[in-house]
Amino acid sequence: MPLRITVRTLLATGLIVLLTATCLLFVAVSGAAAGTPVDKKLSYTCPFPLIGLQKLDVNIKADFDIPAAPGGTLTTSGLTITVSVPDKAARGLNLVGATTIEGTAAAGVTLVNGDAKPFPVTIPLAVAKTDIPQTGGFSPVATGSVPAVTLAKPGKTTLTVGDFTTRLTPKKADGSFTGLGSFTSDCTLDPGQDAALLSFDLGDKPAGHRYAVAGKTTVKALNATAPLAGGFELSPTAATVFTGGPVFDKTHTDFRLFGFLPGAADLEFVADGPQGGDLTGTGFVARPRFTTVLPLVTLVGMPVSSGPGCRTSSPSTAELRTGDGFTMAGGGTLTGTYPLAPLTGCGAFTPYLSTFVQGDGNTFDLVLTPR
């Protein structure tokens, strides 16, 4: 009988320590300064049969990136969680034939971003299969995937660690279960600790930006491409909203009707009403609204329409999205599509010209360079 109690006690202690590995993964999700490593310890109390409440120290190492402004994302990388399991826990597990241990957990954190309501998050975690030595301590390592979190609000932002639940399973060398089966334990963070593992002030709104624009537009119906140059001004008015958009210089395109009849057209994109869009992560989505003007159209070298009255009969709205790798400071690609309405004001050839211009699937392919 005394031997049985000792074995159970040692096994419970081993489970507690391995439980800590899962907790570590959970805690590491919770915070760090931007671009700096985290190395922090916290204490938890976990209830177990026979030995009652046990206090455990956990160690966290990870790198975190904090967004510079609202609308950016909080990301985690280089996450490593290591636990030093004592010799008596290993010996206790060996007594029931356990050679490995593994498990899962559900951990909770609370995010508070500016004046938004506290947002509780439950994170599923895993403790990788870990070998248990015959003698001496061992150090299981827990890792996992942490999703990026978008921080939409300005102001003080905190991420606070909470309690967690874990379920661990020791196994024999042949992969079968020991007499312990799987164990579940609910652990609580010990009081008197700084549970806010991440705390910082997120700026009120991003700074404005000005870019030089270079690229091209393609008019699908004409199968024609025109070079584009100009500028793009972006002025945030809130955490995730901005005003402004592209302003293109007048351009020119050559085309061939029916594949052999040469033609040419000047093109102007004239803004129609307020311009703006949404800030998303490190980039944005712009929705410029404009009228397309064809001040000069020629066929076989002869003008068939001239003057600013030749234009689309209703404005177009494009949806332009920044590409992978785009940053506000460094610029990058901006692409999207737009429709062209039937033409008006092009003289006697208006219906004819409309047939070769109107339609969906027209494109902008741009590169934005900071000025």
Image (cartoon, rainbow, N blue to C red):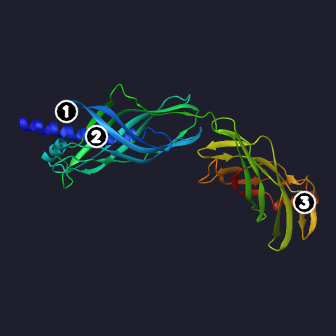
Q: Quadrant of the N terminus?
A: top left
> Where in the figure is residue 100, as x and y percent of width and height?
22, 50
Classed neighbour count for the residue bearing mark 1: other residues with Cα under 10 Å, few (<14), some (14–19), many (≥20): few
Residue depicted at 74% across the width and 60% down the height: 216
Q: How far across and how far down the image is residue 199, in percent?
A: 49, 33
Q: Spatial distance from mark 3 to mark 2, Cα to Cα?
A: 75 Å
Determine the secondary structure under disc 3.
strand
Q: Is residue 143 above or below residue 202?
A: below
Q: Earlier in the sequence, mark 3 or mark 2?
A: 2
Residue 19's label in the rendered image is 2
| Pointer 3 residue | 296
Nearer-N-terminus badge (2/1)? 2
* Element class at badge 2: helix
User: Residue drawn 87% across and 57% down?
Assistant: 294
> Which callout, 3 or 2, points to the residue nearer the camera?
2
Cα separation, mark 3 vs mark 1, equals 87 Å
Q: What kind of residue is marked 1?
A: Pro
Image-based side of 332 in relation to 156, left or right = right
Image label count? 3
Asked if residue 307 can be seen in this view, the reply is yes
Residue labelled with disc 1: 49
Amino acid type at circle 2 is: Leu
Identify the secondary structure beneath mark 1.
loop
